[in-house]
Image (cartoon, rainbow, N blue to C red):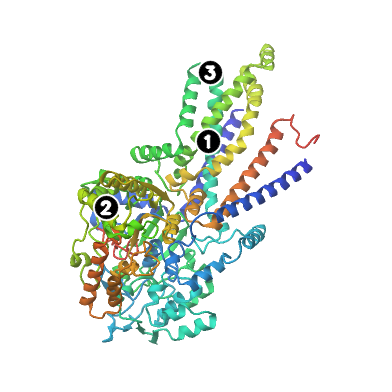
Amino acid sequence: MKLKKILTTAFAVTLIGASLAACGSKNSGNDASSSPSSSASSSASASASGDSSNSKTELVMNYRADPPALDVSKAESAASFTFLGAVSEGLYRLDKDMKPQPALAADMPQISADGLTYTIKLRDGITWSDGSPVTANDFVYSFQRTLDPKTAATYAFVVAWIKGGNDIQSAKDDAAVEAAKKNLGAKAIDDKTLEITLDHPIPFFTSMLAFLNFYPQKKDFVEPLGDKNGADADKVIGCGPFLLTKWDHDQTLVLEKNPKYWDAANVKLTKVTLNIVKDTATGLNLYETGATDYADIKGDQMKAYEGKEDLKIKSELVTGYLNFQATKVPAFANAKVRQAFSMAIDRQGLADTVLMNGSVPATGFVPNGNSDGNGNEFRKIAGNDAIAFDPAKAKQLLQEGLAEAGVSKLPAISILSDDTETAKKMDEYLVSQWQTNLGVTVTAEPMPHKNRLDKELKKDYTIVSTLWGADYNDPMTWLDMFLKGSPLNTQDWTNAQYDDLIKKAQVEQDLAKRSDELVQAEKILLSEQAVTPLYFRSSPFVINPKLKDLILPPYGPDFELKWAHFE
Amino acid sequence: MLKYTLRRLLYMVVTLWIIVTVTFFLMKLLPGDPFGEAVLKLPPESLAIIKAQYGLDKPVWQQYLTYLGHVVQGDLGVSYSFPTRSVVSVIKDAFPASFELGLISLIFAIIVGLFLGIIAALRHNKAGDYTASIIALIGISIPSFVIGPLLSYFIGVKLRWLPPGLWLGPEHRVLPALALSLGTIAILARMMRASMLEVMGLDFIKTAKSKGLSRSTIVGKHMIRNAILPVVTILGPIAVNVLTGTLVVEKIFSVPGLGSQFVSSIYSNDYTMITGLTLFYAAVLIIVMFLTDIVYGFVDPRIRLGKGK
């Protein structure tokens, strides 16, 4: 009887042990030393002892979303840009000052006098991660594929700046597409020389060549995969600092150093593990236990880190603003009414009490940090064009505006917004500001992002609270939205002088003059309050203080890993 | 039994067909466009090509018939948000984690819940009863989205006993499973307690006692066996609830399961994903209910399915 009991117990223990081991082995897939928690704990011990000679080379980060396909042509989200930037590379790579540095290109481009033709020599010895050489044809193929209407690439519009790009995009059938491809202004002069001819001069085009949609693509790899290109770790090829060695969807992505990368000597990290963590509280908990070196946090989580070196704030090229629909609410066609609504908002209060994430009150529409296209920062050139908070004047302006518009009473007004926590808090704040400072009743109408966007684009709103993030680092990405007839000009505002300035700037070759035209255009936009900017967005995060040179660009990718290293 | 099974299978198919149909048409009523910002940036030619790829250029009734034809062949379509991934592959990737989490929680809930219920009944109106009832009350009244972060913070961060999130090794399973099972523990404990108390008052227990049977025999063979029947009937729905209800817990503990996919698909108007996942969840629910009925027949010999019908 006793023996039976012992045997039963032994059997039970074995069974439990085996099942636990099975659970563990399913997910580890690598040795214990490389698991996130163990590498993190090693960092904790290294930092505790302060031993810099034994600095770790494995980084573990939280990441907020599983990237859609890692396909150069189809990349459209920050997640795709971030990972593609790590596994591949363009002719140039932006450094920490957002200045393009030669990457696959041997040097800066030779630009023709008319600013239209770029001749670029490729670096010697650059290869794809499978060892095959990267040639100028890989760029030509990439551009053609992106522009092909069948690829349906969201960011094809930037590649279409190349001469003949629009013709490919608008070609009606396969034969027309193929014919148009032959006329594209991107040619491989030889394996090492690429020539790009633009449709019109673009002063920031060299920076654009660092943008993800201008990366090369390897035809032999991409074509056989078809729609599955970039779907899994084994379906991604690049020529960048890292290789994507593991991709468990919605769970973990692992990057390992690419030994074939031309600048491998300057890549210090040997491995980067990115765990998909969607909840910022959990992300912060993981950071607290040392299981991750980086976590995005929210405004209300910042307080606990104030004064600590872990806390950093990333300024983004993102402006939060309001639009007032003038066709639906004729009173909003009157500039004074719009100015009144804008003037009644205390933006500092919004940043301090609602956003609480490092965002600052907007001082214009083009956000801080955005270039002016002429080597300067736009905001510094344009100055502070914010409408000052002045409730008394706002009330007066509203009366005048309504009288001018011949309106005795405003119709029912609502503020359409996303239904995120922050957006809803902001609705409450704005509604209360307008009620208190203008005596106007506005109701909040939060809804899921895609529904909000749909209603906004269909102009089915009275006031909309929306956001715009730069597609590229130039004022034009902000200002051409409000040209007459633009799909983004949903408020139905038009101004001939504004249109004239923007159209001039689109072809202007004198960069100083162009910058000035764009500044003048923004002044019109703001003086009329065609849009009502509220804040320039920032996002806080915590980072292992020993991790250096992890660049967080203000637009495009979420971070640039190439130069990151531990002290 | 065979006739009964076949009839149930037919009902299952009809139910699924109704669910697919209703979901498909409801989804068409959703405001918004599944392509979001892309609509702004794509030229009309490309937009027309994508719409044609997804069949959105055809009349709705035609889209419906095409979709139904694909579903019959086991093809639930391609996600709009992740165009390289089919809905089936998303389910294949994500469901194992949800299932594993649900299963661990269910096993945990059954063991602890029944144990608490039995203890509460046997110690009726004594300390044991009160303790078990308090635990049950806490489990019912505190939702998982409250208990989850608390467990993650106190056990994960403050005490450092277990990881506060992620889904890597076995140690990462404990906290989410615990957070998910508390509500179920409470339900099972309360049901088991009530059921035990009812059985305890029945005549055959008195008879068993008067026959001089040992307490363990009475409890084990007579009380629990009889009291567990009503509890088994709710195990089906509870199992479904646990398997599919991992949504919040998955997000809190970063479990790569299906729940969060479902929510994000609704937010992104990912039509194929919404319909596919609804269908999948419905199928799981129906199958589990069916299995419960079968198991019920085995547990209670008085029930012989299909007889006399």
Residue A386 sits in quarter: bottom left
Q: Which mark is residue B123?
A: 3
Task: Give how far across and how far down residue A549 sits, in percent.
Answer: 26, 61
Q: Is residue A536 visible?
A: no
Tell me which corner region of the image, top left, top right, bottom left or bottom right, holds residue B236: top right
Observer-nearest of B38 and A22 = B38
Judged from this view, the residue extending furthest toward the right is B308
- Along the polypeptide, which appears first: circle 3 or circle 1? 1
Distance CA(mark 3)–CA(mark 1): 22 Å
Which residue, as the protein is rendered here, is positioned at the far bottom? A189
Which of the chains bears the disc numbered 2?
Answer: A
Across and down, in percent, residue B228 comes to 63, 28
Q: Amino acid at mark 3?
A: Arg
Residue at figure coordinates x 60%, y 22% from the top left: B196
Asked which secondary structure carries label 1, the reply is helix
Residue at 64% from the left image edge and 33% from the top image edge: B233
Q: Is residue A221 left or right of residue B154?
A: right
Element assignment for label 3: loop
Name which residue type carries label 1: Phe
The amino acid type, in three-letter code, at marker 2 is: Leu
Q: Residue furthest top?
A: B210
Is B276 above or below relative to B220?
below
Percent x, y of residue B200? 62, 18
Where is the N terminus of chain A found, in terms of image quarters? top right
Q: Which numbered mark, 2 or 1, is in the foreground of this view?
A: 2
Q: Which residue position is annotated with label 1? A: B108
How many discs appear?
3
CA distance for labels 3 and 2: 73 Å
Q: Do marks 3 and 1 share a chain?
A: yes
Task: Kindly identify which residue carries mark 2.
Answer: A398
